[in-house]
Amino acid sequence: MSKRNFIGVDLGGTNIKFGVVSEKGEVLYKGMRSAGKKLGREGILQNLNKAIQRCLIFADKKGMKICGIGVGSPGTVNLETGKIEGSCPNIPQLVNVNLKGWLSRFFQFPINVDNDANAMAWAEFKFGAAKGYKDVLCLTIGTGIGGGIILDGKLFHGSNFAGAEFGHMTICYDGRRCNCGSIGCLESYASATAMVKDTKRLLKKDKKSIIHKLIEGDLERLTTRVIFQAEKREDAVASRVINQTCVYLGAGIASAVNLLNPQIIVIGGGVSLGGQSFIDRIESQVKRKAFPSAAKSLKITRAELGNHAGFIGAALLVENGLSMTRQVR
Ligand SMILES: [Zn+2]
């Protein structure tokens, strides 16, 4: 058994996923609970606290030593202070909360807080689809679009920890309004939320679509899972939305490829339900638009660690975060 174990927590808009992870990336214990978003800031923090306590109870029972606690949170996370700064559209209650400060009142461990997509990228880089590569771009496409960048084997945060906000790259300068307040962001075109919205709009005009049957006439039941299901049955509305999503993603990813020239792009999140054919279509769009020299040996692949990537990465980043904090100071 590995001697160094960490608690990792992935604080999501809907659920909190958590676990005990060894330094070798093995998941020794895992759990999930509702984030309790409706309970407000205090409720979310209490749920976070309870998740960590469950991990500690497990470690205690097994006689395991815990070496630190890592949290992946939406929003811009100041790595130095542990405070959520700036925009956090998916859990706005957390803006200006010092997560690290709050947690250190309850837990006497080294604590590191980083952005949730950074955590996912780090896990895929260390033990998942991007293992063995050094220049990696990771995208997580779900309610929103998050991103993580690893350059020369190091997680890139940007000068104010606000880098890698892949979902908020402008793909249409006078386009749709985004949750972040800006206009034309990739997230407002290609996230799961955008796919569902676009499908609903088309369904109003197309009464023959099989989707009406799949959701039993209740538009509230529409999810990306249903859209991908309908596409398999050659539904025109579903095909149109999915193909268009691949075009949007292709545009965004090609820009990032031209800027950073990564070796590999890892795509995760709910939208990866689309399977290999979805990835292939994104890849053909990227290769069509990006510089041939940058696209030539580029690999695009699905994330491997699934739902666990966020908390695994958060746990593995504890040591990385501590060394970075020392550097910053
Ligand atoms: Zn935006």
Image (cartoon, grey):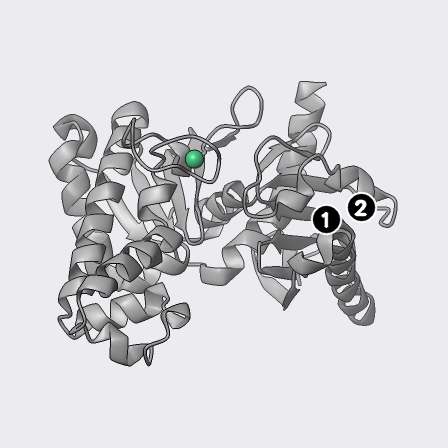
List x then y, in percent, for residue 258: 25, 26
Q: Amino acid at mark 1?
A: Ile
Q: Is residue 164 left or right of residue 294?
A: right
Q: Quadrant of ligand 1?
A: top left
Picture layout, residue 295 above or below residue 24 = above
Give the quarter of the image for residue 59.
Answer: bottom right
Ligand 1 within 8 Å of the CB at mark 1 = no
Q: Amino acid at mark 2?
A: Leu
Q: Is residue 292 left or right of residue 16?
A: left
- Label 1 vs label 2, nearer the camera: 2
At 63% from the left and 56% from the top, the residue drawn is 22
Residue at numbered disc 2:
103
Does residue 133 appear in the picture of this structure?
A: no
Taking depth in this image into account, of 173 and 168 the one nearest to the observer is 173
Of the image marks 1 and 2, the number of the one nearer the N terminus: 1
Q: Is residue 132 left or right of residue 210?
A: right
Q: Secondary structure at mark 1?
A: strand
Does residue 243 appear in the picture of this structure?
A: yes
Neighbours of disc 1 within 10 Å: few (<14), some (14-19), many (20+): many
Proximity of marks 1 and 2: CB atoms separated by less than 8 Å: yes
List x then y, in percent, for residue 118: 51, 40
Check residue 69 in the rendering and tell me which mark sits there, or answer none. 1
Inter-mark Cα distance, 1 to 2: 9 Å
